[in-house]
Amino acid sequence: MIAHRSRARLAAAAAAAAALGALSAVAVTAAAPGQAWAAEEGGVAYAIQPRKFLLSHEFSFNVGVLPMDAFYKGIALGGAYTYHFSEALAWEVAQFTYSLNIDTRLEARLRNDFNPPVKRIPEPRLKYLATTSLVLKPFFGKMALVNKTIIHMEIFAVVGGGIAKPSSPGVRPTIDVGLGLRFFGWKHVSFRFDLRDYASFEGLSLVHYLCITLGVSPAFGEFRAARAPRPTGEPDVGAPATLPPLEGGEG
């Protein structure tokens, strides 16, 4: 049973790494067309529009699942407060996730299927996570939905730390890494998908909690994004064209 638990942990870590890698590939692919366009045209791509939605104080409410443990599944219920410094940088000041654990009855089946019954040392189950994280959000874009609606979105990465509270006494230090997608519905409301791996220290080993959540994020206030200055000689693509005066006066 201990060997089974070790294999399960390795599988959880591999699945978390694969999922985060896949979402990273999506982020890089989304940025590639803009980079290729800039390379073909030469110079700086000033036709790129600034962000339409500029967040400041964000509150997030999430629901999801912790699916990796074979003996139980966790229903994740969480919330967070994030302060946005700029278009590309934010601080998730506090994030809390409670795990509502549901037994898979795997342990009971193992007892019934083996004679003599398998003896297993009960392992603690996750109760909650509390973290603080740095948020990097360099990718922003928009998509057309059936050529009728424009959807604004961003891709962000999260890295931080905190604590994990198992059912056993005490808390464990935890590293938090993840990726996410945000879709803007209105000026002050957005929807997000988060994929996070919480690596909790258990002695000299790591226990991974993969958490997948969907959430809604009301936000209040916004900052003013300063536009980068244009190099000398570059036309202002946002300014109206000025025509030279007609020669010869009025007819």
Image: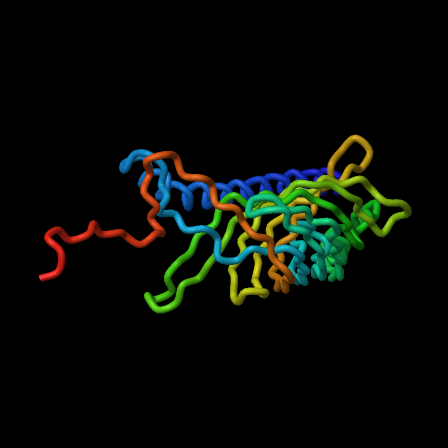
Q: Indicate the position of residue 48 as horizontal and vertical percent values.
A: 39, 47
**Viewed as shown, does residue 113 lie left or right of 179?**
right
Q: Residue at x 80, y 54 (%)?
A: 127
Q: How is the image coloured?
A: rainbow
Q: Indicate the position of residue 87 as horizontal and vertical percent values.
A: 55, 47
From the viewer's perspective, is residue 239 above or below residue 31?
below
Q: Residue at x 79, y 51 (%)?
A: 125
Q: Residue furthest bottom?
A: 148
**Viewed as shown, does residue 74 lie left or right of 16?**
right
Q: Residue furthest right?
A: 169
How many numbered discs, if any? 0
Can residue 199 be seen from the camera position used here? no
From the viewer's perspective, is residue 63 above or below residue 31?
below
In front of the other: 105 or 133: 133
Q: Residue at x 56, y 55 (%)?
A: 54
Q: Indicate the position of residue 152 as horizontal and vertical percent values.
A: 46, 58
Can residue 205 be seen from the camera position used here? yes
Q: Residue at x 64, y 50 (%)?
A: 84
- Quadrant where the C terminus is found in the figure: bottom left
From the viewer's perspective, is residue 133 above or below residue 66?
above
In front of the other: 54 or 193: 54
